[in-house]
Each structure stands twice: as structure tokens, then as C-alpha cells.
Image: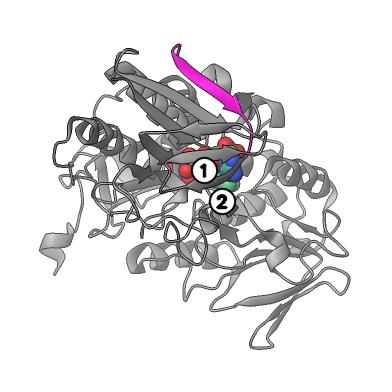
């Protein structure tokens, strides 16, 4: 009997999972259907560059359906709900898809309306986000003429996609204003709910030091209660205020609304309860999740989604054969951190190992937690890898799902 595999979401995780599965399973063994709301696949790391005129908005978008290999059905519609017991999905266009295996790959969505005032007076005038394409494009026009005043970059709450992206924005803003000769007329302040620049101690200390060196003020443990666009101030729940002339805000993230509507599937933020090592959902054995849609304690990053994909595809096949699942996903994540001036850093970590110095992937390679031109080239080349290797489901030589230990200065097991 042919298995019906339905994948909800045709972004990074849904696309690479569908393509890897299609290669692994002949059409006689499984049908694969991917569902998404639109046909515009955005290369999201490129959103960072759009506000600074370093990327053209249309150059980071490709048709979603064209990223899927032959033999994969693409159904363009929103997902309305899942009937977990009856094993079927209801779509916004009225279609009903029955499944034997369901993959939830619907990522995270921005919910700016959760924060008082954020989309009120000042929105897209003095208050912006670069976390989606319309926001990043509008911000580009604003930044091009912003030449004096207070720029505030604010993360409202965690978790967010790519937790380093707001820091990268600060570094690029510093570089951009220096290039335009207006840096001394502009203050840059990074306002975060965390107790430091980043989530883990070593990287937090390194990145915090870099902010200081560049004259970027850091405001920590700030829980934004209101964005007052008309008055030009962030207001914290503890009544602290941060004034601004231009605010770049990363809004609250949540999972897809249909997850919340399916009892037992997701947490309070609609992220799917998922096994840390197998990617199987906790609610039903034939439901799996990948990428930003999971509630796992990992960064919401394309690299995480990529590494998870290998375990997930193996486990879908094992599930269909009735075999025990592979529990090998170790929380591996890596991110380039663009720091301006044609340089970038790289961090590599997993559930046990915080980002530390050294090299990736072995003792020789890209420098970790250190600025270099090589890392900047790696960040730029990643867009090519994304479309031509990662999404098509090709293996990248030397890059394994398991976090490499060899090049790390302080591997977790020897650091304790
Ligand atoms: C500014 C920015 C910079 C980033 N930089 C990096 C970086 O440098 N490195 C890195 O690794 N990662 C980076 N990321 C994060 C990375 O893009 C995401 O983590 C990755 O795309 C997650 O893949 P995903 O498949 O889980 O979600 P997505 O790729 O977002 O795909 C989810 C898909 O589900 C669809 N969907 C959602 N709800 C529904 C519904 N109800 N019905 C139908 N379809 C639905 C959406 O339309 C979307 O296509 C960045 C993200 C941003 C915003």
C-alpha cells in the first residue's frame, strides 16, 4: 500500500523534507503532498541585508512550487485544522487531505498585534521590523535618509527566528552610518529581554564586548509592554522607558494558529510538543515536526532545520517500516553573525555545547566566535547553498548533522 505523506508548510523544512523523502521513497511506496499559503519562498537570512541596500528584495524570493522535485504534489492553500484522531487535515480552500504520516513544517509567525501600540501610530513611519519582506523593504527607504537621532533595536520576547539577527542588524547599522559619515549624529541602542547580548555565556560576553567597542548601548532584561510610536518610546512592564526616533522591532513569534486549535499538539505559544532527538510529536506517533514549528530548546534557524531534516527523513521511513526511531538529533545549530566591514563570525553549538572559540568543522576551517573575512564569504555563499544544496536535499561535503567536536577550544564534556 502506498503511504500518504502530507507536509504542512513549504518553507525551508517542508521543502527539504519533501525533496529528501522523494529521493528515498519511490512513488509506488508513498505520495508526498506539500501545502502552503502562497507561492513565494523567501530566503529569510537575506532579509537582514535588504534594509541596508545590500540585497534586492526580489533577489531573495523564488517560486515555492519550483523548489519541489518532480513527483511531489504542491497544494496552495492555508491549513485550517488537523483532526488528529481521524488523521486528516482541513484546508482553507475546503479540501480535506487524509494522511498516514503528517509533518508539521509551518514555522513561526510574527504576531506584532500582541504588543500594545506596535502596529499603531508610527508603524512603517518611525517603527519598523525587518523580519518580513514588506517590513525590510520599507525600512530600506527609511534608513537611506535617516541621518541623525536615536535608533533603537528591540527584541520584544523570546523565542525568535535567528536570535543573532538583531545583533547583526546593530553591527550593520553601525557600519552603514559610518560609511555615510553620519555615525556621530546617531546613537544605537540594543534593547533585549535577555540578561546579556545573547543566550549563552561565552558568546554573550564576546558579543556584548563588540557592542561596547562600537559604541552601541545595551539595555538588558527589558520586557516591552508598549511601543509608543507617536511619543517615540518603548515602555517596559517595569515602567522603564527607552526613547527613540527610529525603532526596529522584532515582534513576538508564535506557531501556526491551527496548532493551537488541535488539543495536545502544541504549547501555549502554539509550538509543537516534539521529541528532542527523534522529531516525533508527543501527541501521536504518525505526526512529526521540523524547524521553527517545534517547541524544542534550539535556535529557530535554517541550520537547525537542515540538520533536523536528516533525522526526520530517516525516522519517517523507519516509522513506515515499523522500526524503532533514530534518536540521533543532538540540537546541532550554527549561525554566521555578520559584523559589518566585510567580516562575520560563526557560532556552532548543540543541546550540551555552548558556542565557544576554535574552528569549524575540524581543527582547520572557519574561525569560531571570531570575526573574519572568510566567515563573511561563507555567509554570502550560503544563499547559493540554500537554493542549490540545502532545499534540494543534497548532502554538503564535510557538514554533518552531528555537531563536530574536533575544532572546539572547550568541548562541553571537558569543560566541566
Ligand atoms: C531576518 C531573519 C534572518 C535569518 N537569518 C538566518 C541565518 O542567518 N541562518 C539561519 O540558519 N537561519 C536564519 N533565519 C531563520 C530561518 O529562516 C528559519 O529558521 C527557517 O526558515 C525555518 O524553516 P521552517 O521551515 O521551520 O519555517 P519557514 O521557512 O518559515 O516555513 C514555514 C512555512 O509554513 C507556511 N505556513 C505557515 N502557516 C501556515 C498555514 N496555516 N497553512 C499553510 N502554510 C503555512 C509559511 O507560509 C511558510 O512558507 C533568519 C530568519 C529571519 C526572519
Residue 218 seen in render: yes
Q: Residue placed at 70% from the left, 45% from the top?
A: 179
Q: Name the one closer to the observer, 214 or 140.
A: 140
Q: Which mark is residue 258?
A: 2
Question: Taking 215 as reference, is 225 left or right?
Answer: right
Closer to the N terminus: mark 2 or mark 1? 1
Tell me the residue at 15%/65% (across/down): 415
Q: Quadrant of residue 389?
A: top left
Determine contact: label 2, label 1, CB under 8 Å: yes
> Could you say where residue 218 lies in the image, as x and y percent from the top left?
57, 72
**Residue 201 placed where, x, y %?**
35, 69
Q: Is residue 146 above or below residue 2?
A: below
> How many angstroms separate mark 2 from mark 1 (CA)?
10 Å
Q: Which circle marks residue 394 in the picture?
A: none
Examine the structure image and report whether residue 171 is included in the region drawn in magenta.
no
Find numbered disc 2 in the image and state the secondary structure of the residue it sits on: helix
Any part of residue 340 in sight: no
Q: Which residue is mark 1?
A: 106
Magenta span contains residue 72: yes
Q: Is the C-beta of the residue carrying label 1 under 8 Å from the nearest atom of ligand 1? A: yes
Image check: 34 left or right of 315? right
Vertical position of residue 20 compared to residue 136: above or below: above
- Would you say the beta carbon of the disc 2 residue lies within 8 angstroms of ligand 1? yes
Q: Quadrant of residue 44?
A: top right
Residue 344 location (% of width, % of height): 46, 44
Between disc 2 and disc 1, the foreground one is: 2
Q: Which residues are magenta?
A: 68-78
Q: Residue furthest front?
A: 86
Amino acid at each position: 500500500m502506498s503511504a500518504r505523506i502530507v507536509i504542512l508548510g513549504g518553507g525551508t523544512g517542508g521543502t527539504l523534507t519533501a525533496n529528501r523523502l522523494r529521493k528515498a521513497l519511490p512513488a509506488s511506496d508513498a505520495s508526498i503532498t506539500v501545502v502552503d499559503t502562497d507561492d513565494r519562498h523567501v530566503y529569510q537570512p537575506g532579509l537582514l541585508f535588504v534594509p541596508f541596500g545590500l540585497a534586492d528584495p526580489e533577489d531573495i524570493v523564488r517560486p515555492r512550487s519550483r523548489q519541489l522535485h518532480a513527483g511531489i504534489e504542491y497544494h496552495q492553500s492555508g491549513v485550517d485544522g488537523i483532526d488528529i484522531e481521524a488523521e486528516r487535515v482541513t484546508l482553507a480552500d475546503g479540501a480535506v487531505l487524509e494522511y498516514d504520516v503528517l509533518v508539521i513544517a509551518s514555522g513561526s509567525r510574527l504576531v506584532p498585534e500582541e504588543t500594545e501600540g506596535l502596529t499603531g501610530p508610527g508603524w512603517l513611519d518611525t517603527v519598523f521590523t525587518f523580519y518580513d519582506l514588506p517590513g525590510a523593504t520599507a525600512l530600506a527607504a527609511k534608513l537611506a535618509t535617516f541621518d541623525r537621532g536615536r535608533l533603537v533595536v528591540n527584541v520584544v520576547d523570546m523565542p525568535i527566528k535567528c536570535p543573532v539577527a538583531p545583533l547583526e542588524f546593530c553591527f550593520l547599522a553601525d557600519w552603514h552610518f559610518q560609511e555615510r559619515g553620519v555615525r556621530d549624529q546617531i546613537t544605537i541602542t540594543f534593547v533585549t529581554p535577555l540578561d546579556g547580548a545573547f543566550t549563552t555565556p561565552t558568546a554573550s560576553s564576546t558579543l556584548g564586548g563588540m557592542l561596547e567597542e562600537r559604541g552601541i548601548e545595551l539595555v538588558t532584561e527589558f520586557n516591552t509592554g508598549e511601543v509608543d510610536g507617536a511619543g517615540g518610546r518603548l515602555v517596559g512592564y517595569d515602567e522603564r522607558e527607552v526613547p527613540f526616533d527610529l525603532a526596529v522591532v522584532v515582534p513576538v513569534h508564535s506557531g501556526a494558529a491551527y496548532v493551537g486549535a488541535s488539543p495536545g499538539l502544541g504549547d501555549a505559544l502554539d509550538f509543537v510538543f516534539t521529541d528532542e532527538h527523534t522529531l516525533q510529536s508527543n501527541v501521536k506517533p504518525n505526526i512529526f515536526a521540523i524547524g521553527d514549528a517545534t517547541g524544542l530548546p534550539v535556535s529557530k534557524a535554517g541550520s537547525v532545520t537542515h540538520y533536523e531534516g536528516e533525522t526526520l527523513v530517516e525516522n519517517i521511513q523507519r516509522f513506515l517500516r515499523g522500526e524503532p526511531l533514530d534518536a540521533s538529533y543532538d540540537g546541532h545549530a550554527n549561525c554566521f553573525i555578520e559584523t559589518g566591514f566585510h567580516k562575520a563570525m560563526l557560532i556552532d553549538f548543540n543541546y550540551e555545547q555552548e558556542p565557544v572559540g576554535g574552528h569549524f568543522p575540524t581543527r582547520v576551517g572557519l574561525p569560531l566566535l571570531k570575526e573574519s573575512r572568510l566567515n563573511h564569504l561563507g555567509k554570502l555563499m550560503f544563499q547559493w547553498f540554500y537554493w542549490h544544496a540545502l532545499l534540494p536535499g543534497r548532502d554538503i561535503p564535510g557538514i554533518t548533522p552531528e555537531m563536530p567536536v574536533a575544532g572546539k577550544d572547550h568541548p562541553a564534556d571537558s569543560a566541566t
